Image (cartoon, rainbow, N blue to C red):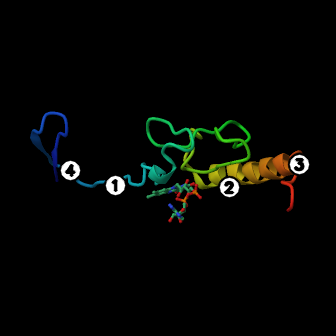
Amino acid sequence: GLTYQDRTTGESHTLELQGVFVQIGLLPNTEWLEGSIELSKRGEIVVDERGQTSVPGVFAAGDCTTVPFKQIVIAAGAGAAAALSAFDHLIRTTAPVGS
Ligand SMILES: Cc1cc2nc3c(=O)[nH]c(=O)nc-3n(C[C@H](O)[C@H](O)[C@H](O)COP(=O)(O)OP(=O)(O)OC[C@H]3O[C@@H](n4cnc5c(N)ncnc54)[C@H](O)[C@@H]3O)c2cc1C
């Protein structure tokens, strides 16, 4: 079975069960970006369909973003799109003087 505490009421409950599927890994480790890049209320990096973040020239992909589906094939595709977007950004941007 499963004994758990309701975080809203503090009440303890017990369920008699034959099996449990544990779902983990829903919170992105993006605290270090707070204040520099727009994050959703769940801490996901806000991106558009090109992987562009709120900071021009900074791209993001994968589960840590606002992409609606957190699956391997989605993250891989978004990574490819973000890389192409970064390339596209670089060829349209003048290099800094002295570089
Ligand atoms: C339990 C579980 C089961 C899953 N099962 C499936 C499944 O069956 N099929 C499927 O398609 N998807 C599944 N997923 C989802 C899949 O794992 C993710 O969608 C995918 O791994 C996302 O890839 P990602 O590169 O965006 O992130 P991740 O694979 O999470 O990679 C992020 C990497 O960044 C590193 N990192 C974090 N913070 C920092 C930092 N500050 N500096 C440097 N590195 C950092 C992490 O250590 C990690 O290696 C599952 C996920 C979980 C948690």
Q: Nearer the viewer, mark 2 or mark 4?
A: 2
Amino acid type, mark 4: Leu
Residue count near mark 2 (Cα–Cα under 10 Å), binned few <14, some 14–19, many ≥20: few
Left or right: residue 25 versus residue 4 is right
> N-terminal of the two: label 2 or label 4?
4
Q: Residue at x 19, y 40 (%)?
A: 7
Provide the secondary structure element on which disc 3 rests.
Answer: loop
Residue 30: percent from the left, percent from the top? 48, 51
Decide if ligand 1 comes within 8 Å of the CB at mark 2: yes
Q: CA distance from mark 4 to mark 1?
A: 13 Å
Q: Where does label 1 land, which residue?
A: 22
User: Which is more toward the observer, 70 or 17?
Assistant: 70
User: For numbered disc 1, what is the local secondary structure?
Assistant: loop
Q: Position of residue 73 (x, y in %)?
A: 65, 53
Residue that mark 4 sits on: 17
Residue 74's tag is: none
Q: Which residue is mark 2?
A: 76
Which mark, by number, is residue 94? 3
In front: mark 4 or mark 1?
Answer: 1
Asked whether the beta carbons under mark 3 and mark 4 sit within 8 Å of each other, the answer is: no
Q: Nearer the viewer, residue 38 or 18?
A: 38
The reply to whether dot 3 and dot 2 touch (C-beta < 8 Å) is: no
Question: Amino acid type of disc 1?
Answer: Val
Q: CA distance from mark 1 to mark 2?
A: 24 Å
Mark 3 vs mark 4, foreground winner is 3
Sequence-first tag of 1 and 2: 1
Observer-nearest of 32 and 77? 32
Q: Are marks 4 and 1 in contact (CB under 8 Å)?
A: no
The residue depicted at 56 percent of the width and 43 percent of the height is 45
**In the figure, residue 46 lies in which quadrant?**
top right
Does residue 7 appear left or right of residue 86 in this picture?
Answer: left
